[in-house]
């Protein structure tokens, strides 16, 4: 009986060990997104070229308002990952390259910029075990990487390339870099802000958290997803993220105690609010 039990335990351990080894063996540092990102690539029914699955332009023939159609699809599927999409050709080509995915229609991108951006994304992905990291760890890694860039508000600093490769970014540059890296590691992301300012918002363990990269903060705060984007004829209009949250029944938590590792409290808009603190990781 003991021998049978021992054999059973050894068999289970062997299966687990084999699975873990297989998982590790499938990771290729040269193509870190291979076997993971392929489902996000489609052939656009509009252009016949490679496109990101949730890009609203793919739905041009589906509706007179293809952006609303794409949004409604994300709501119906309760799919916050689809709120983010890669429409920039260089970004799309870089992700495809890291996935070892054959593309069409991206041959015209600047090859030097493509190579440099690809290197930065690859280095980021190879710097931590993103496939088994928690949402929180992914958000911290992204915040740490984008804030390696210095804040510079001028023309040309609004791109993920300027942030990740050139090391300078305005608020749009930080946010676009966040969107790119979040797409790679499977972390839902959107943005909030105003006409003159924007910042990334991550969905971490089903809680939307805001991050302010321009001041290189070392904390997240609860995202004010229901803050009005603007008023029109006396009516309040939400941001796209606010509309998504409203449609899917998201509630801003009244407490995050025990949900995140390091919480302190401060004052936001005259009220006590949690500050979810972390250490910026050096790159």
Image (tube, rainbow, N blue to C red):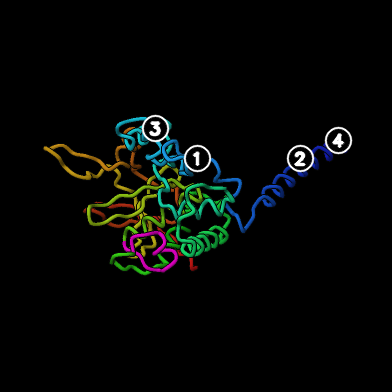
Placement of 100 over or under 233, stated as above or below: below
Instruction: Check if mark 3's residue and mark 1's residue have beta carbons within 8 Å.
Output: no
Q: Residues within 10 Å of mark 4 (few under 14, many from 20)?
A: few
Placement of 62 over or under 191, stated as above or below: above
Return the mark for residue 12.
2
The CA span between labels 3 and 1 is: 16 Å
N-terminal of the pair, mark 4 or mark 1, is: 4
N-terminal of the pair, mark 2 or mark 1, is: 2
Asked whether, in this view, residue 256 is left or right of residue 103, the answer is left
Secondary structure type for disc 1: strand
Placement of 99 over or under 217, stated as above or below: above
The residue shown at (26%, 54%) is 268
Dividing the picture into quarters, in which one does residue 4 lie?
Answer: top right
The residue that disc 4 covers is 4
Secondary structure type for disc 4: helix
Q: Closer to the observer: label 2 or label 1?
A: 1
The CA span between labels 2 and 4 is: 12 Å
The CA span between labels 4 and 1 is: 50 Å
Instruction: Check if mark 2's residue and mark 1's residue have beta carbons within 8 Å.
Output: no
Return the mark for residue 73.
3
N-terminal of the pair, mark 2 or mark 4, is: 4
The residue shown at (28%, 67%) is 154
The residue furthest left is: 233
Question: Which residues lie in the magenta part?
Answer: 157-170
Asked whether, in this view, residue 159 is left or right of residue 232, the answer is right
Asked whether, in this view, residue 83 is left or right of residue 8, the answer is left
The CA span between labels 2 and 1 is: 39 Å
Relative image position of residue 45 (x, y in whole percent): 44, 35
Relative image position of residue 243 (x, y in whole percent): 30, 37
């Amino acid at each position: 009986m003991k021998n049978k039990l021992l054999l059973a335990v050894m068999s289970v351990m062997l299966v687990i060990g084999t699975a873990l080894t297989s998982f590790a063996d499938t990771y290729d540092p040269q193509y870190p997104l291979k076997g993971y990102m392929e489902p996000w690539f489609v052939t656009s029914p509009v252009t016949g070229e490679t496109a990101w699955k949730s890009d609203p332009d793919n739905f041009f023939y589906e509706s007179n308002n293809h952006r609303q159609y794409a949004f409604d699809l994300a709501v119906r599927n309760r799919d916050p990952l689809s709120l983010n999409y890669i429409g920039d050709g260089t970004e799309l080509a870089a992700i495809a390259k890291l996935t070892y995915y054959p593309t069409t229609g991206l041959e015209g991108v600047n090859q030097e910029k493509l190579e440099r951006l690809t290197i930065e994304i690859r280095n980021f992905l190879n710097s931590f075990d993103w496939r088994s990291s928690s949402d929180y760890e992914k958000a911290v890694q992204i915040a740490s990487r984008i804030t390696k860039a210095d804040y510079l508000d001028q023309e040309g600093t609004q791109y993920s390339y300027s942030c990740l490769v050139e090391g300078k970014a305005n608020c749009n540059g930080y946010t676009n870099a966040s969107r790119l890296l979040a797409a790679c590691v499977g972390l839902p992301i959107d943005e909030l802000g105003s006409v003159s300012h924007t910042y990334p918002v991550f969905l971490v363990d089903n809680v939307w958290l805001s991050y302010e990269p321009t001041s290189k903060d070392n904390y997240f705060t609860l995202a004010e997803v229901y803050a009005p984007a603007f008023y029109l004829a006396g009516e309040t209009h939400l941001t796209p993220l606010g509309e998504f949250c409203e449609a899917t029944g998201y509630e801003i938590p009244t407490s995050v105690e025990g949900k995140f590792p390091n919480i302190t409290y401060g004052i936001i808009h005259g009220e006590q609010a949690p500050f979810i603190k972390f250490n910026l990781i050096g790159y």
